Image (cartoon, rainbow, N blue to C red):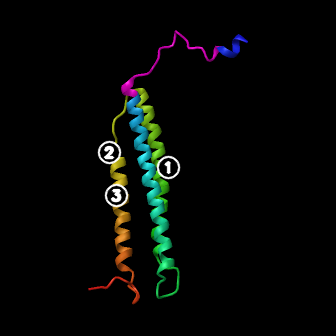
Amino acid sequence: MHLLFKSTKVDADKPRRLNPSRVREHQANERTYLAWMRTAIALMGFGVVIVRLRTFDPPPVPGPGNGWKLGLVFSLVGLMTVLLSTGHYFAVRRDIEEDTYEPADRWVILLSLAVILLGAGVIYFAFAAPLSPMSPVIPE
């Protein structure tokens, strides 16, 4: 019976590692990770919206069109954001534990470039699509 409760007993020999500043660093890392996840979900959702907008205003020429490609790219970038941010989270977690953390600018640059390219795709898609006569937007 003594063996069952031994694992719940706190060892006096082990030092407690509750450093408040390290705990805050881990919490900040988790908040950053969750922000990346929100970004990924938004990218994937925006990709779905782009694809679904086609059903509200079908093109005058039958065929698949190019909107689905832009929606697919948004969804793929969202999935890549999930994968990269998960790897980044665990790398930062390890660096915090080893006290070797150095912020990496490459993640900021990578995500910024992805959003710039996606934004350029949206702008092109929005202005390259011909307006239908029934469209509420009146060209000048």
In this picture, is 123 found above or below 42?
Answer: below
Q: Label 1 near label 3: C-beta < 8 Å?
A: no
Q: Position of residue 75 (x, y in %)?
A: 49, 61
Q: Residue at x 48, y 60 (%)?
A: 44
The quarter in which the C terminus is drawn is bottom left
Q: Secondary structure at mark 3?
A: helix
Residue 27 in view, yes or no: yes
Query: Residue tagged by mark 1?
Result: 83
Query: Residue tagged by mark 2?
Result: 105
As shown in the figure, which amino acid type bears the numbered disc 3?
Answer: Leu
Quick check: 86 left or right of 128? right
Quick check: 63 left or right of 108? right
Q: Secondary structure at mark 2?
A: helix
Q: Report crowding for label 3: few under 14, some 14 to 19, many 20 or more residues within 10 A (C-alpha).
A: few
As shown in the figure, which amino acid type bears the numbered disc 2?
Answer: Asp
Q: Position of residue 62 (x, y in %)?
A: 52, 86
Q: Residue at x 34, y 57 (%)?
A: 113
Residue 50 magenta-highlighted: no
Q: Residue furthest left?
A: 140
Q: Residue at x 35, y 74 (%)?
A: 124
The quarter in which the N terminus is drawn is top right
The main secondary structure of the magenta stretch is loop
Q: Report crowding for label 2: few under 14, some 14 to 19, many 20 or more residues within 10 A (C-alpha).
A: few
Q: Quadrant of residue 10?
A: top right
Find the magenta span and give its range: 6-22
Task: Give the camera-side residue of 48 and 78.
Answer: 48
As shown in the figure, which amino acid type bears the numbered disc 1?
Answer: Leu
Q: Report crowding for label 1: few under 14, some 14 to 19, many 20 or more residues within 10 A (C-alpha).
A: few
Tag on residue 113?
Answer: 3
For the residues labelled 2 and 1, the Cα–Cα distance comes to: 18 Å
For the residues labelled 3 and 1, the Cα–Cα distance comes to: 17 Å
Q: Secondary structure at mark 1?
A: helix
